[in-house]
Image (cartoon, rainbow, N blue to C red):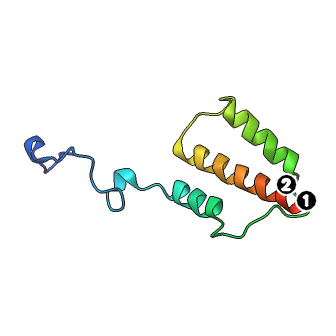
Amino acid sequence: MTDDVDEGDRDDGDGVPDSDPRHIDPAGDLADLVESGEFDIALDDDQDAEDLAEFVRRAEAGEFDADPALEATVRMARALLEDDVEDES
């Protein structure tokens, strides 16, 4: 398949983060909302906070391939754990 755009016509600039598909980060956006408290989420009674903390430790230790989605998931997990600790106080 050929590309209809001439190489000289391409704009390789940074683009506009809110509209440039190279900068769309839905997982990061969701993590921002969780961290800010916009989403009122918490661990369920049958969920183990220690399992979630173990996931965060393993991710921070580099046991998983790092990508933006993993980073966002770790951020959300940290926020859940912080809320869980606050709820226990």
Kindly check if marks 1 and 2 are in contact, taking CB atoms under 8 A apart as contact: yes
Q: Is residue 62 left or right of residue 23?
A: right
Residue 44 image position (x, y, % from top left): 85, 64
Q: Residue sitting at 65 percent across and 33 percent down?
A: 64
**Which quarter of the image is occupied by the C terminus?**
bottom right
- The image quarter containing residue 63 is top right
| SS state under label 2 | helix
Q: Is residue 82 left or right of residue 60?
A: right
Residue hosting label 2: 85
Q: How many marks?
A: 2
Quick one: label 2, few (<14), some, or many (20+) residues within 10 Å?
few
Residue 67 image position (x, y, % from top left): 54, 40
Q: Residue sitting at 53 percent across and 45 percent down?
A: 68
Q: Is residue 43 left or right of residue 30?
A: right
From the viewer's side, name the closer residue of 56 and 84.
Answer: 84
The three-letter amino acid code for the residue at tag 2 is Val
Q: Residue sitting at 87 percent across and 57 percent down?
A: 47
**Which quarter of the image is occupied by the N terminus?**
top left
Residue hosting label 1: 88
